[in-house]
Image: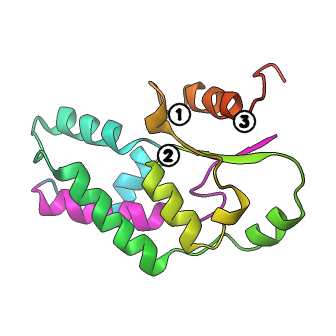
Amino acid sequence: MVIFDCNGVLVDGEQISAAVAAEEFTRAGIPMSPQLVARFFTGRRVTDMIADIETATGRKLPANFAGVLAAATLRRIRDELRATPHAAYALTWLRGPKCVASSTSLERIRVSLETAGLLRFFEPNVFSASDVPHGKPAPDLFLHAAAQMGIQARD
């Protein structure tokens, strides 16, 4: 079995999400650059990013901030996201079970894969860190994906 990450592997959505996050944090009164977001939060769950920023700044973001950020990110992804070069070709030839396990929300994973034309290679085997208690780098997500695919972790 092969477990793929989504962003940075199958699609390149990190620059888009860092730019949107920087815009939304700035709009909420916490000026931030896309480079800063990328440096500290690439590959992390949005809830963890928000909690870290609230702790670091001593400011509470609006209650709907995560939803606003998610909606803005999905709009940009639908408009701009593309598959990583040759990903579809490689997936066409890859045999055996495969899935996607990503730190982002299930909705964003699905929208990203669908927009890039890759969802067909994985459906329904798409898993999110929101399904487990601890996101990456903890192994919870990978263990969950393997279990859902009927694979023993030791294998």
Residue linked to disc 3: 149
Front of the two marks 3 and 2: 3
The furthest residue to the bottom: 79
Could you tell which of marks 3 and 2 lies nearer the N-terminus?
2
Residue linked to disc 1: 136
Mark 1: which secondary structure? loop
Q: CA distance from mark 1 to mark 2?
A: 8 Å
Say left or right for 127 vs 121: left
Q: Residue at x 87, y 48 (%)?
A: 96
Do residues under tags 1 and 2 come within 8 Å of each other at their CB atoms? yes
Density class for disc 3 (Cα within 10 Å; few <14, some 14-19, many ≥20) is some
Residue 66 visible here: yes
Q: Residue at x 44, y 55 (%)?
A: 107
Do residues under tags 1 and 3 come within 8 Å of each other at their CB atoms? no
Which quadrant holds the N terminus? top right
Mark 2: which secondary structure? loop
Q: Residue 86 placed where, x, y %?
A: 77, 72
Instruction: Residue type at mark 1: give it.
Output: Lys
Residue linked to disc 2: 43
Mark 3: which secondary structure? loop
